[in-house]
Image (spheres, rainbow, N blue to C red):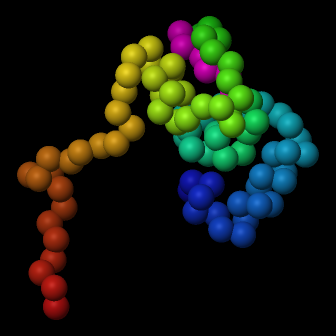
């Protein structure tokens, strides 16, 4: 479940993290930005960047993680997309 899907529970979760101030690891970049004030990016077991989350984006973090520009959106080919039911 994404942090944005938590609704009212999101505030409790953010409060919990703020009180604990413990590091955690995740690839869910929007959640990282939503609940942290600093982030360290690792690649190949090494810290390659440290950023204030208020001064970065999910796109920049993804690029740093991979070491090149990446796309955060996914395009599904029509032949693999689920069929849409005709309107009733």
Residue at 71% across / 29% down in the picture?
52
Residue at 55% across / 40% down in the picture?
28
Q: In this view, does 3 lie above or below 56?
A: below
Is the stretch drawn in magenta largely helix, strand or loop? strand
Say whether residue 57 is left or right of residue 52: left
Numbered-mark total? 0
Q: Residue furthest bottom?
A: 88
Say whether residue 77 is left or right of residue 62: left
Q: In which quarter of the image is residue 19?
A: top right
Residue at 77% across / 61% down in the picture?
11
Residue at 46% across / 23% down in the picture?
63
Q: In which quarter of the image is residue 32?
A: top right
Say whether residue 66 is left or right of residue 38: left
Quarter of the figure with the C terminus: bottom left
Q: Position of residue 18 (x, y in %)?
A: 85, 45
Q: Position of residue 72 (x, y in %)?
A: 39, 38
- Please check the rendered image and state whether residue 41 is part of the magenta-colored stretch, yes or no: yes
| Front residue of 51 and 65 | 51
Q: Where is residue 37 in the image (x, y as percent from the top left)?
A: 76, 36
Q: In this view, does 74 lie above or below 10?
A: above
Q: Position of residue 59 (x, y in %)?
A: 47, 33
Question: Which segment did they paint magenta?
Answer: 39-44
């Amino acid at each position: 479940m994404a942090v944005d899907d938590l609704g009212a529970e999101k505030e409790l979760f953010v409060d919990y993290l703020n009180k604990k101030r413990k590091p955690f690891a995740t690839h869910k970049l929007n959640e990282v930005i939503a609940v942290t004030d600093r982030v360290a990016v690792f690649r190949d077991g090494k810290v390659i960047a440290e950023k204030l989350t208020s001064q970065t984006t999910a796109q920049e973090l993804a690029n740093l993680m991979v070491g090149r520009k990446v796309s955060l959106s996914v395009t599904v080919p029509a032949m693999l997309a689920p069929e849409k039911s005709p309107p009733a």
